[in-house]
Image (spheres, coloured by chain):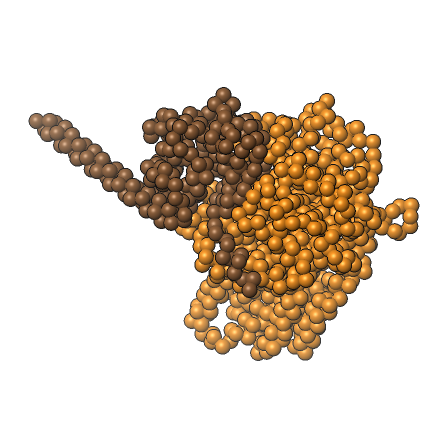
Amino acid sequence: MKAFLSVLALAFSAVAFLNLAARNALQTEEQFARQRRAMVKEQIAARGIKDSATLRAMEAVPRHDFVPESYRKHAYDDGPLPIGYGQTISQPYIVALMTELAGLSKGKKALEIGTGSGYQAAVLAHIIDSVYTIEIVTELGESARERLARLGYQKVKTKIGDGYFGWEEHAPFDAIIVTAAAEHIPPPLIKQLKDGGRMVIPVGHPYFTQNLVLVEKKGGKVTSRDIIPVRFVPLTGGPRN
Amino acid sequence: MNFLTLAVGILSACILAFQLVLMQLLSISHWYHFAYMVISIALLGFGASGTLLALTRDWLLHRFDAALAWCCVAFMVSIVLCLYLAQQFDFIPFLVVWQPSKAWSMLGYLFLLFIPFFLGALAIGLVFTKHTSEISRLYFANLLGSALGGVGGLVIMWWIFPQDLPRAIAFAGLATVVLSLWRVRRRLKPLLPAVAVTVLFHIWQFLSPLSLRVSEYKSLSKTMNLPDARIVREKASPNGFIQLVESNLLRYAPGLSLNYSRPIPRQVGVFKNAEWIGAAIPPEGTLGKRDATEYLQYSTSALPYHLGKHDSICIIGVGAGTEVLTALASSPEVLVGLEVDPALLSISKEYLERTEPVREYSGRLNLIAREGRGFLTRQTNGGQGRSAAKFDLIVIPLLESFSTGATGIYGIQENYLFTVESFSLMLSRLKQDGMLAVSEWIKVPERSVLKLIATLVEALQASGVQDPSQHLSAIRSWGTATLLVKRTPWNAAELARIRQFCQERAFDVMYLPGIKEEETNWFHQIQQPRYFESISAILSPDRTEFISGYPFDITASTDRHPYFGHFLRWKNLPRFIQQVGREGVPFLEWGYVVILATFVQVIVVSFVLILLPLIFLKRKGLELTAFWKPALYFGGVGVGYMLLEIVFIQKFTLFLNHPLYSVSAVVTGMLLFSGVGSLSIRAGKGVPLQTLRWILIGIFLMCILYMVVLPAVFRGLAHLPDFLRYAIAVFLLSPIAFLMGMPFPSALARLNWMNAPLVPWAWGINGFASVVSAVLAIIVSIEHSFWLVFLLAGGCYLVALFSRRLE
C-alpha cells in the first residue's frame, strides 16, 4: 500500500511538473512572439522596411531558436549575436534589409552563401519555395540543417561546401544573398545570377555591417550599388553652411 | 643589499619585457589597439601596489623577507597563470556595444592581466620602502633594468614564438625568486612552501606549455575553419607574428572587377598577428599558366601599369608580393620593392622568386627591407654622386586588411607615409613625366579617399604645382580606389587610356581633369554621388572652407599631425549620435573608442585607488593637508615623465623610420639616462632644494627647446645611416632624461626623511599619474598636436616646482 501511494504521488508530481513546464514553455513562446512583434515594429518597420512579405517573414521566424541557448533572452535585441566559429546571426534589421533588397516574391529562387545558424534561410523560406543555402564550416552547416528540419523548414536545401562556386545544378538564381563579408565578389556567383537577378553582400566586420553592396545583372550588364543602412544625408549635408 | 639591487633590476626588466610581450600577444589574440590598454594596465599595477603598500606598510615591512620572496614567486607564477586564465574568458570586445553587461567579462579579463604587474611592482615598492635611504641606487637599478628589459623583450621576439614568450619571462623571473631566497638562506625553513610552488610551477609549465587562443573573429581563425586549412609556416619577429596558411579555398583579390570571370590561382594566405595581409602565390599557382596572374590586372591598383611603359618602378610596401607580380606584367627595367618588415619580406621574396613571372623577368628586381620614406630620403644613384634615385612610377599598394580597414582600428597610429611631407618627397623622386599611385579601401560615408586627395593636393602645391586639378586622377571599384598624381599635367591620350581601363573593368571614374558629373557613378553607384562634388571642392580655392565643414576630419595629414586613419570630429559627435543613434556604431573608429574608454576607466580607477589610502591614512593621524603638496609634486613628475616618453616615441618614429626602433631607442635612452641621473644624486636627502628647483626649471626649458629644435634636427640628419641615427636619437635624449631621473628619487628620499608613511603613497600617486598621462598623451596628440604634449609635459614639471615645499 505504501509503495502504491508513493508511486501514485510520484506520478502525480510528474504530471504536475510536466504540465507546469508545458505552460511555462507556452508562456515563453508567447513572450518570444510578443518580443518578435515588437522587434518588427520598432527595429525593422520603424527603420523604413516596407516590403510586407519581409515583415511577415520576420514576424514568423522564431529567432530565439536560431541563437545559442545562452543568448536566447537576447534573441530579439537590436543587435547581432555570436553563433561560434567567428560567425554571427546578423542584427534583425540587417536580415530584413538584405531580404527586402533581394526583391523576392512567390515562385522565385534564392541562394544563400553562409548558412550560419540558418535564420536568413528560414526568413527566405517564408517568402519563396526554393531556398538553397551553402555553409563551409561543417559544424555550423550540420547544426543548421538539423535545426531547419526540426523547425519545419524542409523546403530549404542545405549543402556543406565552398560557396565561392555557388550551386551550379540549381542555377540560375533570382537572388543570391552572401551573408559573410568578402573582399571581392566571386565571379562564379555573378555567372549564376539570372538576368534581372540581384545579389546582396554585406561590407564590414561581422558585428558592424557598414554597407551592403547590391549587385544587379540586366541584359548581361553587371552593375552594383551601395546601400548604407544609416541615413547620413542630413549629417553630411548640414555642417557645410 | 646587492642582492636586492640586482633583484630590483631583474624584476624591472621582467616587468617591462612582459609589457612588450603582452602588447604583442594581445595584438595577435585580439587587436592592436588593446596594446594601449596594456600600458595602462601595467602602470595601474604600479599605482595599486603603492596603495597597498601605503595601507599595509608596517605589516609588510615587519615581514619584509617573506613578503618579498612571496611577491617574487607570485609574480613569476602569475605571468603564465594569469594569461592562461584570461584566455579562458569568453572575451568578445565588440559584443559590449550590443550587450553592455559583457563589460564585466572584459573587466575580469583585464584584471587578470593586471595581476602580474601589480605583484612585480609590489616587490619593487617593498624594497624602495624598506631601503629608502638607498633610493638613488635602487631607482637606478629599476630604470636600468627596465631599459634592458625593453631591449631584451624586443630581442627575444626574434627568437621565440609568441606563445612561448611568457614562459621565457617567467624563467627570467626565477632569478628574482632565487635572489630573494638566497639572501635568507639561513632562515629558509618558513619559506619552503615558496620553493615548492616555484618547483611545481616550472614542472607544470614544462608539461603543459601555454597555447595562444586567437579570437574567433580574426581572419586567421576564420581561415582555419576552412576544411583543408593548415598552417605551413610561422615566423616570429617584434614586427609581428607571421603565419602562412595553405588551403585550396583561399582566394584573395581585393576589389576585383565584376567583369572578371576567370579563375583565381591557388594562393597561400599570409597573416600577420592573425590578420590577413595578403596572398602569396605558390610556384604551382603560376607554373605553365601564363595568364595565372591575369586577375591582378582586374583591380583598380593595376591602372598605372596600363598607362604606358615605366622603366623604373618603386613599390612601397611589398606585403605578400602580389603588387610586384602586378607590376612585372608591364616589364619594367628596374623594379624596387620595399618592405618595412624584414621577416615578411624574406617570405614574400622566397615565394616571388619561385613564381614563373619573376623567373622569366629579365630586368632587375630589387627587394629591400626598408621603410619607404627612409629609403627615398637616403637612396642615391650609385654612379652619379649624391643625386637622388628617381623613378617613373612610385606605388603605395593597399594597406591594412579588409576587415581592419573597415573598422578603423588604426586611427590612433601615427602614419608618416601618408603625409604632405612624405608625398612631396615621393613627387621629388619621380622623373619628369613620372607618376605616384596610391590605393585605398573605400570607406562609407566617404572620408579616407577624400583625406588622401586633400593630402596629395597639398603635396602637389608644396612641390610647386600651380593647378593640382590637372595632375590628379582617381578611379574606384565597389571596394577600392586608386589615385594617381603626375608631376606634369595629364595629356589627352593618357586620359583616354584611363577611361578605357575603367570601361573594360566596370570601374568608375571619380575624378579626371575636365570630367563632367554625368561621367561618374556608372558601374558601382553610390546613393549620393558626392565624390565628384567633394573632389571638385577640394581642388577649388574654397578647399579650406569645405574641409573644415565636412562631418569627418579629412584635413590633409602632415608630419605635425600624422593620423591619416583618424576621422572623428568631436564637434559633430553629439549630432552624429543624435541622428543615427546605435545604427551609427559601425561607423565609429574603434581604435579611438578603445583609447577613450581606457582613459575614462583609468581616471575612475585611479581616483578611487588614490582616495582610498587617504581615508585610511587620515585615521592613522595624518592630516589631509599633508597630502596635497606631495600629490601635486609626484603627480606632476609622473604625468610629465610619461607625456614626454610617449611624445618622444611618436616624434622619433619619423626620424628612425620605424615605431619599433623608436620605442626601443626612447625607452632605453630615457630609462638609462634617467637611471644615471638618479644615481648621481646623493643618498639620504636627495639633491638640495635649490638644485632641485633648477632641475625642474631646466626640464621645462628643455621641453620647449626639443619642441622647437627636433623637426629641424630630423630634417638635417635624415640622410644618415640607420645605426648613426639610432645612436643620435639616444644621444639627443640623454640631457633631458638625465635631469628627469632626479626629481622623483630626490623628493622621495626627502619625503622619507620628513614623513615616511607618505612614501608608498607617493610611489602610488606617481604610478597613477603615469597611467593617466600615457593615454592622455595619445589623445592630446590626436586631438591637437605634439607641440601641446611637450608644453603640457613642461607645465607638469612647473607644477612640481611650485609644490616643491615638502616641509
Please state which of residues A48 and B143 is positioned toward the viewer in this rendering: A48
Q: State the image coordinates of residue A39 (x, y, percent, origin top left).
A: 35, 45
Q: Colour of chain A?
A: brown
A159 on left or right of B427: left
Q: State the image coordinates of residue A46 (x, y, percent, origin top left).
A: 38, 49
Circle count? 0
Look at the image and tell me whether residue A106 can be seen.
Answer: yes
> Where is residue B68, by image quadrant?
bottom right
Q: State the image coordinates of residue B604 (x, y, percent, origin top left).
A: 47, 62
Look at the image and tell me whether residue B182 can be seen.
Answer: no
Please state which of residues B391 and B751 is positioned toward the viewer in this rendering: B391
Residue at x 50% of width, y 53% of height: A232
Q: State the image coordinates of residue A73 (x, y, percent, origin top left).
A: 34, 43
Residue at x 36% of width, y 49% of height: A42
B410 on left or right of B397: left
The quadrant the N terminus of chain B occupies is: bottom right
The quadrant the C terminus of chain B occupies is: bottom right
Q: Colour of chain B?
A: orange
Please state which of residues A30 and B666 is positioned toward the viewer in this rendering: A30
